[in-house]
Amino acid sequence: MRPFRLCLKETKLTVAQLPMIALLLVSSMAAQNLNANKISPEAFPEAPLQTSFLEPAAKPEKVFDKKFFAVMGSLGAAESLRFTSRKLVLEREYAAGAPWVSSVPSNQGMVAKDLALYSSEFLVAYELKKSHS
């Protein structure tokens, strides 16, 4: 047998739930009945006209074509040549004891920075090349 306090809590919970369920059911039925007879077809706006000046057979212009790959490939080659030459110069100056080179930066940091730079250049070139109609 349950204690009296536990039964009292369950009763209060049930008493609180019943009006909420009844209110929920009555409000949804009232809303359906209210809206079913009031809306007339004249109240709705006319359907929008679809106008298109594009031909259905027109193909979209390709962004990634031979020219794009050639230009971005040459840019990538120039970036990698710049990275390699900068790295070699820094290593040689550090080995020679140049006072302006305190340490040789790690490859990971330089590669991450240069990759972010190249990817932003790639994104800008892509956005400029794609059609904006």
Image (cartoon, rainbow, N blue to C red):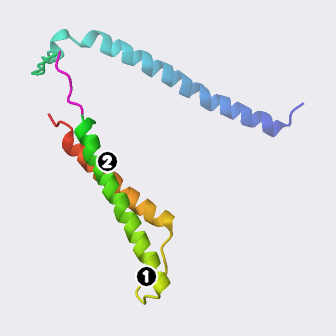
Which of the numbered marks, if any, corresponds to residue 101?
none
Q: Which residue is rendered at x = 29% and y = 41% of the image?
A: 69
**Residue 58 lies within the magenta run:** yes
Residue 130 lies left or right of residue 83; in this view the side is left
Q: Which residues are magenta?
A: 57-62
Q: Nearer the viewer, residue 89 or 34?
A: 89
* Mark 2, secondary structure of its residue: helix
Task: Decide which of tag 1 and tag 2 comes sooner along the chain.
Answer: 2
Q: Nearer the viewer, residue 123 or 71?
A: 71
| Disc 1 + disc 2, Cβ < 8 Å | no
Residue 20 image position (x, y, % from top left): 54, 28
Residue 96 image position (x, y, % from top left): 46, 86
Q: Nearer the viewer, residue 55 or 78?
A: 78
Q: Is residue 117 visible?
A: no
Which residue is labeled 1 in the image?
93
Q: CA distance from mark 1 to mark 2?
A: 30 Å
Q: Which residue is rendered at x = 20% and y = 30% of the image?
A: 61
Q: Amino acid at mark 1?
A: Glu
Residue 81 lies left or right of residue 127; in this view the side is right
Most common secondary structure along the magenta stretch: loop
Q: Is residue 55 visible?
A: yes
Which residue is labeled 2 in the image?
73
Local crowd size for mark 1, using a 10 Å CA cut-off: few (<14), some (14–19), many (≥20): some
Picture quadrant of residue 99: bottom left
Q: Decide: is 84 above or below 39.
A: below
